[in-house]
Image: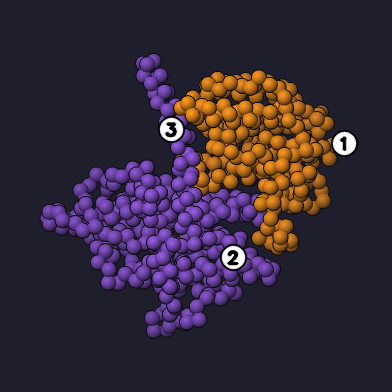
Chain colours: A orange, B purple
Amino acid sequence: MTDQSALFEYLLRLGDNTLVLGHRVSEWCGHAPVLEEDIALANTALDLIGQTQMWLGLAGEVEGSGRSADDLAMHRDVWDFRNLLLVEQPNGDFGQTLMRQCLFDAFHLELLTDLTRASDDRIAAIAAKALKEVTYHLDRSSETVIGLGDGTEESHRRMQTALDLLWPYVGEMFTPDAVDLAMHAAGIAPDLTALRTRFDTRIDAILTEATLTKPDSTYAQSGGKTGFRHSEHLGHMLTQMQWLQRAYPGATW
Amino acid sequence: MYAQMVKSEATAEDPQKLAAFQARIDAGEKIEPKDWMPEGYRKTLIRQIGQHAHSEIVGQLPEGNWITRAPTLERKAILLAKVQDEAGHGLYLYCAAETLGVSRDELTEMLLDGRMKYSSIFNYPTLTWADMGAVGWLVDGAAIMNQVPLQRTSYGPYSRAMIRICKEESFHQRQGYHIMMKMAQGTPAQKKMAQDALNRFWYPSLMMFGPSDKDSVHSAQSMKWKIKMNTNDELRQKFVDQTVPQAEFLGLTVPDDTLRWNDDKGGYDFAEPDWSEFFDVIQGNGPCNTERLAARNKAWDDGAWVREGLMAHAAKKRAAKLAAE
């Protein structure tokens, strides 16, 4: 794998994570439990879509075949997506959505923090901008997970269910493959093992305050970031997201 | 206009107080929450601001319907920002209504059980991407016609909410028109979508101003109190006069064979919408009334455990803080 193709793959991972999660969060629009949450969810989705424009825009530049961020978002099929399995999981109830967000935010925050020191200035600049937004995302998602975990009996039960359901998708974030290793060697990506330690410290503190029990399992589903085997959910999302571009090829919107 | 057919309340209070109140309004003073106000003024405002707030909230749904299908990342971001603004408008307006002695939860319950209304326009479906353009251009355009004068309304909190809202609404309208321009200048299929959207949204947009109110007692009282600034017909005329040239610029045809420029009045003559359709929609028989209210009820019911959970957590934290002191 050349450095350029690893870099392209790596940027797709960053951009597809924010694209797919941003899309999922945007599905809540107008249906949240309370008005403030409608606003916060839309705001989070908006940040993530903005980050997508930057990551996939840079991916297109690095690839050098003239593909724009929109081309990458709207004209790839499932096997070309490089997002984590975690972010393509369905929203479920509000608790499941916020648990997914919190697990991703805790990873995302640590990742972006390290990426601000990347040897590639373009990546460092995008990471610095995104980090400001993601700091807020984690504040909000962790507070909500804590509030609901330590709320009523029902909210506690729902949050524990969400955690148990999503935990098998945590491992993929920290399991390095050839792309991660090449990017680490190039001074761009962090060492994922060290990142896991920081993630665990953060998540343990959140879960303790939320009175939730971390599942006693290290089993990790995989296949999202390599594109080898996504879940069935992603294809359905793409049929919606890409529909207009596919149905009316060549049109400008 | 997001408040339609708001009935003003009769008021039976001390004539001297009423006269002094009216004098303040006539002098252009703002009425603030702690000031004395006639009961009718307070109730009418609750109804009007509440209906406006509900319209913002229900109005998230027809546009939210296209967020997951927006054709580009930029369009998706713009639409998200717009729907987020609308939720924000709902929030300011509920806050303004709360200064009149009603809680947001009470207003929400009245929306959900049908005691309070929201604008008829949001009971129409959004069927193609061009509808996102038409909603911004026509629906927000019609709303602005009413909201710009309401920045000068007599009730301080309402006036201040309107000032903030108008800034964002005019941005929304430009975005909507921009979508229409892209579509109208696009492929034949896009142009067809744009014309189809105009065909479907033209008359419902004219209905947003409500039926002619030139003989309405309610309107007269509300205008005297400066919580309604223009008649429905004045605003509708202004809207048509502004919108027809915009449609011409797009190369689209307003679906009204009778539309003519009238030199004498300096405005267009145009066909009235079908008011029986309007009353049907108001009665709950519009194409999407059932779905819109069901969606809001579902969001509220499904969210009950979240609201209860967060309240319970806040109560625990308060108790722990008290115990520590």
Q: Are marks 3 and 1 in contact (CB under 8 Å)?
A: no
Kind of residue sitting beneath label 2: Met
Residue A144 seen: yes
Which type of secondary structure does the marked residue at label 2 adopt? helix
Residue at position x 39%, y 61% in the image: B283
Per the image, the residue denoted by label 2 is B180
Chain to which the residue tagged by mark 2 belongs: B
Mark 1 surroundings: few (<14), some (14-19) or many (≥20) residues within 10 A = few
Chain to which the residue tagged by mark 1 belongs: A
Chain to which the residue tagged by mark 3 belongs: B
Q: Is residue A122 left or right of residue A135?
A: right
Kind of residue sitting beneath label 1: Met
Percent position (x, y) of residue B11? 19, 56
Which type of secondary structure does the marked residue at label 1 adopt? loop
The image quadrant where one finds the N terminus of chain B is bottom left
Per the image, the residue denoted by label 3 is B308
Which of these two is toward me, A88 or A127?
Answer: A88
Q: Which image quarter: residue B148?
A: bottom left
Q: How many marks?
A: 3
Per the image, the residue denoted by label 1 is A1
